Image (spheres, rainbow, N blue to C red):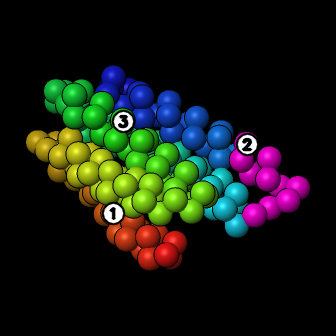
Amino acid sequence: MDSASVPFAAVGSLAIIAGGLVAAATAHAPTEHGTWAAAYLVLVVGVCQLAISAALALLVPDLPIRGVATAALVMFNAANAGVVVGTTTSWNWLLAAGSVLLLAALAALAFSVRGANRGWPLHAYYAVIVVLAVSVPIGLILQH
């Protein structure tokens, strides 16, 4: 696995565990926000980062993207923290800031594979990014 992809895999794995812990902690008295947070942590923060990690390892093993990937990793996780905290506390300003930062992180991730070999892994990678990017305004509309 490429060194740029390892942090994504590590944080994605931790997010899946965190989502499971949130689900377990709120199982006795489930709330809308608790259930949403557990699913978001597992699916968006966890599974998507594992997909990003795999794609980076497949698509750019020899490209010098470490700086871009590190910036994208920080932005992606800070953005998702803002989305989770903003949603669960109803701090709409934080949700909006996290959403904008998430779109910037997705743009950085798309940029990070420039020069990569074409093929189905690249198309799958872009599909994940597009699905996430499209879900951002939908999530904002649903929250408001």
Secondary structure state at the residue bearing disc 1: helix
Question: Marks 1 and 3: which is nearer the front?
Answer: 3
User: Residue placed at 33% from the left, 63% from the top?
Assistant: 133
* Residue 66 appears left or right of 89: left
**Type of residue at label 2?**
Leu
| Percent x, y of residue 107 | 23, 52
N-terminal of the two: label 1 or label 3?
A: 3
Where's residue 50, x and y in %? 46, 42
Residue 34 or 132: which is nearer the viewer? 34
Tag of residue 71: none
Local secondary structure at mark 3: helix
Between the C-alphas of marks 1 and 3, the distance is 17 Å
Between 32 and 61, the residue placed more toward the observer is: 32
Disc nearer the start of the sequence (3/2):
2
Residue on which disc 2 sits: 21
Q: CA distance from mark 2 to mark 1?
A: 27 Å
Q: Nearer the viewer, residue 56 or 10?
A: 10
Residue span colored magenta = 21-31
